[in-house]
Amino acid sequence: MISSDVRERLKSYYINKTTHDKDDEEKEEADRVAANIAKLLSEKSFSFTALEFLNIHRHLFEGVFKHAGEVRTYDISKKEWVLQDDSVVYGRAADIMMALRYDIQQEKEFNYKGLTTDEIIEHIVDFVTLLWQNHPFREGNTRTTAVFVIKYLRSIGFKVNNDLFANNSWYFRNALVRANYRNPLKGIEPNKSFLIKFFRNLILEEENELKNRYMLIGYQDDCDTHTSTHTSTHTSTHTSTNNSVSSLSENVKRLVIVIGTEEKGIKEMMDAVGLRNRPNFIEYSLTPAINGGLVTMKYPDSPRHPRQKYLLTVKGLAVYNEFKEMKK
């Protein structure tokens, strides 16, 4: 445990140092935040709330970031090495607090009784994935998530510490990125297997290999799996697509074209197709598209999720591509 005296000496060292460069600044941030993490994790008090999440960020980065504890007011994207400079779709700034409260409330109401160890870990991974995707802050989201999750897991009986997070911080972040990243055009779906390995090491003290290169989009082992899956799926759906396109209603056809390769909310879709009557849109456009296997929810287990979006399935994308070919 790092005492307040040690933290003060760290602060004094960097203030009194006669020369400073960029490396010093980065080292100072890392030292201060590491000291703050140790202090927070030494405290037994914890409140499983969205406000606590914000307070953890404030305590971690006070004196490091001017915006410590403040929710960002603009939408963001971040180029990721593991995605070859593509970005995860992060939560909308306007919805952050509502989404954060929702995710935490859903976890509060979840019942772990009767679950196997594997099922418990998979559920924890699902929760952490959603929590991190909110990305409430300009910087420091992953470290805040780590501390919040450690304190939460301790509060429900798990004996965990920060060592794995500290020693594998880049892996943890990249695993969260891959768990949230989806690109149907490249045949890539969210992959939580890397994060599951991490949490099995954390909770069960397993020794799964945690290598960042395995998560890189295009890495041979990963690429082969995606390629074979995508190719076989595309081949099987393409044959049936020609026969099914002509049988679709005009409402469903319009909806498929409107969604395309994006993720859209109900209002966005209604505006795009020029409809104002929500019940009619759901009954005659959205529901038939879902029942036909063309459209799916982004959060199928939480239909009323505040960030709920709709996107095309592999079958829906095949139909969409067929429409594009027909227009050429």
Image (tube, grey):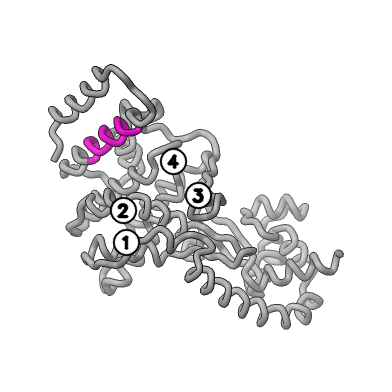
Q: Amino acid at mark 2?
A: Asn
Q: Nearer the viewer, residue 252 or 257?
A: 257
Gap between marks 4 and 1 measured at Cα: 23 Å
Q: Amino acid at mark 1?
A: Phe
The disc label shown at residue 168, or none: 2
Q: Which residue is mark 3?
A: 80
Compare marks 4 and 3 and give the one earlier in the sequence. Answer: 3
Label 2: state its secondary structure: loop
The label nearer to you, 3 versus 1, is 3
Q: In the picture, residue 278 is in which quadrant?
A: bottom right
Up the image or down, 33 lies above or below 180; here it is: above
Label 4: state its secondary structure: loop
Q: In the picture, residue 255 is in which quadrant?
A: bottom right
Q: Amino acid at mark 3?
A: Glu
Q: Is residue 158 magenta?
A: no
The label nearer to you, 4 versus 1, is 1
Specify whether residue 58 is in view.
no
Magenta residues, start to end? 26-37
x and y, in percent, of residue 28 in the image = 29, 30
